[in-house]
Image (cartoon, rainbow, N blue to C red):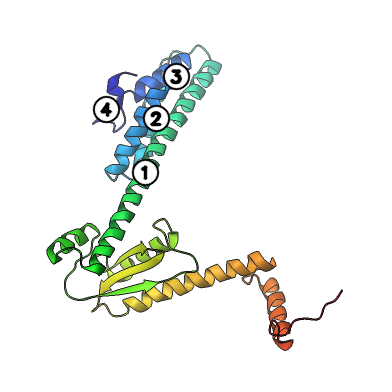
Amino acid sequence: MSDGAARTSAHTGVPDGFRTLLAEAARTGRRPRRAELEAFRQHGAAAAARGMPVRDLVGVHLTVVSGALAELPGIADAASASQVRAATRSVLAVVEQVLSATLDGYADSQLIAARQDGEARRQFVDDLLQGRDDVGRLAERAQRFGVLLAGSHVVAVARGEHPFTDRDPAMRQVEAALVHRFGSHNVLVAAREGLLVCVMPSTLRGAPGEFAHHLVGRAVSYRLERIKALTGYSPTEPTQRFTLEAAVLGARLLDWPAIALPDTD
């Protein structure tokens, strides 16, 4: 694949060399070389940076395959059905490799962006809480996260069973729920030193309670999973829950663990 393969076609939305790869696969069975796959990986990374949905990214590649398949050499001029099948298998193998490389680049780009975003959030929250930047600059930085710093704000801080991190699904879930209810310009959620920090306008009635409500739900879910891990019984299963309730009742009647149980040996 030539240097032009790394360039994206304005017409198809895929690297220029994609169709050439398909044609060579159908004719000779050739697989993509490492440099060619790297070009597609970079293409996927660039698509992620542009904000292109992954569904659309896969779709433009499949559209090219669908439109070109019947006309590819090795398929269009095949002498038998078995040759058509063999050529088609080679093409599909190349499509699989290309999409895998493309999606790897897409995922890597998103991971880097998420890490950078998490670091920027932490730094912004630190500067906001400690007043290390002027108000105008803070307001400008806040706009990056969709937050309008106008008027007074409330900072809610929560500690979980385990330290919160930027990649903690709970952080994204809490933020998504708050944004859905109160709007994207009103809340900012970030992990800071293992804590979950939420910045919200003081006029936003109900927001602190909603923030706490979601964390309580997370803690309950964690404890249910912990019970299952320790006992082998799930509190969410009716029959197993009865066994657990009976055990709890027995422990209370025996005042355990305040009073040690007698040794049965």
The location of residue 41, given as percent across then percent down, is 37, 33
Question: Crowding at label 3, few (<14), some or many (≥20) Cα neighbours within 10 Å?
Answer: many
Q: Could you say whether the residue bearing mark 4 is in a helix, strand or loop?
A: loop
Q: Which residue is mark 3?
A: 25
Amino acid type at circle 2 is Ser
Q: Residue at x 71, y 87 (%)?
A: 255
Q: Could you say whether the residue bearing mark 1 is in a helix, strand or loop?
A: helix
Q: Quadrant of the N terminus?
A: top left
Q: Which residue is mark 4?
A: 7
Q: How many marks?
A: 4
The location of residue 16, given as percent across then percent down, is 29, 25
Q: Which mark is residue 66?
A: 2
Tell me the CA gap for discs 2 and 4. 21 Å
Tell me the CA gap for discs 3 and 4. 20 Å
Q: Which residue is mark 1?
A: 54
Q: Earlier in the sequence, mark 1 or mark 2?
A: 1
Amino acid type at circle 3 is Ala
Q: Earlier in the sequence, mark 2 or mark 4?
A: 4
Q: Residue at x 38, y 46 (%)?
A: 111
Q: Could you say whether the residue bearing mark 2 is in a helix, strand or loop?
A: helix
